Amino acid sequence: MVLLCIEIVTTKNYHMKEITTTEFEKEILQADKAVLDFYSSECPPCDALAPKFESLAGVYGSDIKFFKIYRQQNRDLAERLGVYSSPTLIFFDRGKETGIRLTGGIKRSEIIHNLNSMVSPQKASSIKNSMKPFATSCDVAIIGSGPGGLTAGLYLCQARINTVLIDTGLPGGHVSITHQVSNYPGFVDPQPGYLLSHNMSEQTKKCGTVFKVAVDVTKVDLKKKEIVIDEYETLKPKKIIIATGTSPNYLNVPGEREFKGKGISYCATCDAKYYADKEVIVIGGGNSAVEEAEFIVKFASKVTIVHQFDKLQANKQAQEKLLANPRVNVMLSHEPRSFVRSGDKMIVTVENLKNGMTSDLITDGVFIFVGLRPNIDLFGKMLDLDNWGYLKTDEDMRTNITDVYAVGDVRSKKYRQITTAIADGTIAAISITRELDN
Ligand SMILES: Cc1cc2nc3c(=O)[nH]c(=O)nc-3n(C[C@H](O)[C@H](O)[C@H](O)COP(=O)(O)OP(=O)(O)OC[C@H]3O[C@@H](n4cnc5c(N)ncnc54)[C@H](O)[C@@H]3O)c2cc1C
């Protein structure tokens, strides 16, 4: 019953060499063109990069030399080059750094972009033509590696079902960017979200599930069961589990998209640290807004919550804890109308919904937590949705398309939590195991 993942066309010979600090000058600085990967051990994003780096060495290797260097044993060189995280890719043209440094969950398309800028356009196009698309097959493909997808992967793997887990980012989903999780059973004390998601991901990986993460998912055909990854690999599973979760809602007011990442953030864990001793406005009044505001106020000198209703919607305990902090203010019955940048400051124009008057709030940064929307754009219009755009399933997590399942936050349901996503992943995996066993 179990099919191995088969790579139908593989890459050619490639030039790749592991170097140390003593070889850096000769191999990199004296080379015509080179790319250097600073990697570490026990580094999931480094593991995710390795096969992409190798396969690109196979196609660019005669024009650009590919090198790897173990960061932990070559610390001085790393520091001299300003490398503080793994993996970091640095590109060199005749001894000088060129292009954009890449770090974290590095995508194949980002590396190709840099490599192409180092060769002529004709060469780039002939290399592109030489990259032969290939197909792989497996029993189950899971799209999305948050708690729902990871749990499904774990159960399927333990049932010896050949499973591939695909994610456009690194594994972990929302949990990896939640600062503390206090309601996940089995831990006496709150757990840092990144650690909880790291452990979930390592457990699933250790079992043998194949991870294809930090990839571009360019096309999905749910009927034919085909998933195109990075434009050149077509994965052909027997069954597909959609576990793509949700993304933050936009307010859709002027200035929001323009200043996203330049004063406006949707992730406290990622960005609160940049607001140490600064003033911040948080938009929203539900659980996420209040819990994330509590994290932000550890850094910020003042947090003002702007909320459209005349009371906060978050759970009472979280509200009381936050509002007891003298550095937190709340502006109820107000809605943002525009965001403008003025030097280092953001100007947020808000409307008082009770009297229609507008006023300008000047702040250092804005965090927006106004709900979430399901990540379903990739899947076309064939799936049955509820009135809010979430995927409808039966109680075994089957969608209306044969052999396509949906689990976690992307699914139509009442409560979206880590524990409920995990439950969905478990149910889908057991249902699939029974079907494949028959
Ligand atoms: C700020 C915040 C705080 C929270 N705090 C808690 C808490 O304390 N306790 C709790 O129980 N719950 C909490 N939650 C809810 C919890 O995080 C979610 O219910 C849970 O993560 C859902 O898991 P999931 O696997 O369905 O989706 P997600 O965790 O959203 O993971 C989805 C994954 O799919 C990937 N993906 C998306 N689109 C694609 C695509 N097109 N192709 C491939 N991959 C894709 C994403 O990169 C992501 O890795 C919180 C949520 C937020 C937003």
Image (cartoon, grey):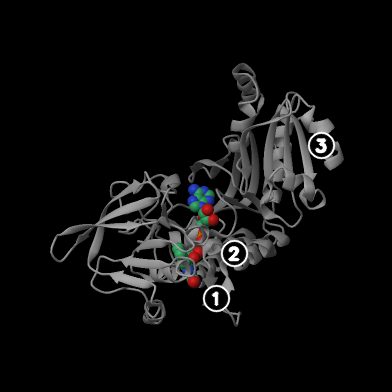
* N-terminal-most mark, 3 or 2: 3
Task: List the residue tagged with mark 1.
Answer: 184
**What crowding class fits label 1: few (fewer than 14 Cα within 10 Å), some (14-19), or many (20 or more)?**
some
* N-terminal-most mark, 2 or 1: 1
Task: List the residue tagged with mark 3.
Answer: 24
- Please name the residue shown 19% across and 63% down the image: 352
Q: Nearer the viewer, mark 3 or mark 2?
A: 3
**185 or 71, which lies in front?**
71
Instruction: Measure the C-alpha gap from mark 3 to mark 2.
Output: 34 Å
The three-letter code of the residue at mark 1 reads: Tyr
> Would the CB of label 1 be found within 8 Å of ligand 1?
yes
- Please name the residue shown 65% across and 52% down the image: 211
Task: List the residue tagged with mark 2.
Answer: 194
Q: Position of residue 30 (x, y in %)?
A: 80, 27
Asked if disc 3 and disc 2 are in contact, CB closer than 8 Å, the reply is no
Secondary structure type for disc 1: loop
**149 or 85, which lies in front?**
85
* Dot label at residue 121: none
The three-letter code of the residue at mark 2 reads: Tyr
Tell me: 64 left or right of 303.
right
